[in-house]
């Protein structure tokens, strides 16, 4: 097997964001590498098992499942900058953002067109070291944590530290 560092989680989340943004063209997508292979979700050694940062990236993007993908507009023009996907169903919006930049915090304000936010919660996967990983000895180095998100009726505000993935669930 190969160790999966934080950069693997960022790559997985950015790839999933691309799939979500192309949901009108894709019928189905599956993870091929599950256990003990390149870019796997789980690493095992005998009776021991550890969740990789890529596992948690997939977990953070679960709120998009079975929802309708929405188009969004961004002022971001940096080709290696912010990655976003948005989806909606039954009075709930899922918003996933990836900040792949190693040295820049991104402060986002997402304006909701044609909807009003009532509340929101967010979770963040983050580590300042691109090569940090979960090991059998330290399995919880990189795990999602609750993250502050601010809502007004018309917008959602979120701060993304460098090298992070965040998913906000917004109740409309």
Image (cartoon, helix red, strand yellow):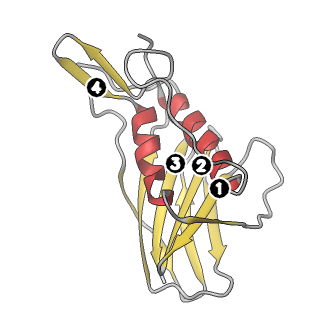
Badge 4: few (under 14), some or many (20 or more) residues near its Cα, within 10 Å?
some
* Residue position marked by numbered label 2 in the rendering: 98
Q: CA distance from mark 2 to mark 1?
A: 7 Å
Left-right relation of 31 to 75: left
Left-right relation of 25 to 86: right
- The answer to whether the residues at label 3 and label 1 have Cβ atoms under 8 Å apart is no
Badge 1: few (under 14), some or many (20 or more) residues near its Cα, within 10 Å?
many
Write down the quadrant of residue 122 in the picture.
bottom left
Instruction: State whether residue 32 is above or below residue 48.
Output: below
Indicate which label's residue lies in the foreground, 2 or 1. 1
Q: CA distance from mark 1 to mark 4?
A: 28 Å
Nearer-N-terminus badge (3/4) = 4
- The answer to whether the residues at label 2 and label 1 have Cβ atoms under 8 Å apart is yes
Nearer-N-terminus badge (3/1) = 1
Instruction: State whether residue 97 is above or below residue 140.
Output: below
Nearer-N-terminus badge (1/4) = 4
Place of residue 92 in the rendered image (x, y in percent of width and height, measured from the top left): 47, 75
Write down the quadrant of residue 133 in the picture.
top left
- Residue 165: give its label: 3
- Residue 59: give its label: none
* Residue position marked by numbered label 1 in the rendering: 84
């Amino acid at each position: 097997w190969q160790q999966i560092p934080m950069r693997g989680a960022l790559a997985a989340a950015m790839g999933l964001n691309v799939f979500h943004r192309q949901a009108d063209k894709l019928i189905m997508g599956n993870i091929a590498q599950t256990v003990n292979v390149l870019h796997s979700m789980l690493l095992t050694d005998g009776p021991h098992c550890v969740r990789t940062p890529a596992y948690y990236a997939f977990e953070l993007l679960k709120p998009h499942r079975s929802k309708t993908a929405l188009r969004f507009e961004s002022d971001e023009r940096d080709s290696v900058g912010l990655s976003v996907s948005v989806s909606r169903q039954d009075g709930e919006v899922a918003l996933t953002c990836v900040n792949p930049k190693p040295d820049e915090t991104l402060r986002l304000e997402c304006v909701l067109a044609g909807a009003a936010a009532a509340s929101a919660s967010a979770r963040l996967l983050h580590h300042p070291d691109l090569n940090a990983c979960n090991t059998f000895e330290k399995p919880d180095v990189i795990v999602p944590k609750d993250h502050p998100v601010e809502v007004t009726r018309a917008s959602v505000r979120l701060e993304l530290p460098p090298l992070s993935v965040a998913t906000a669930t917004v109740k409309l």
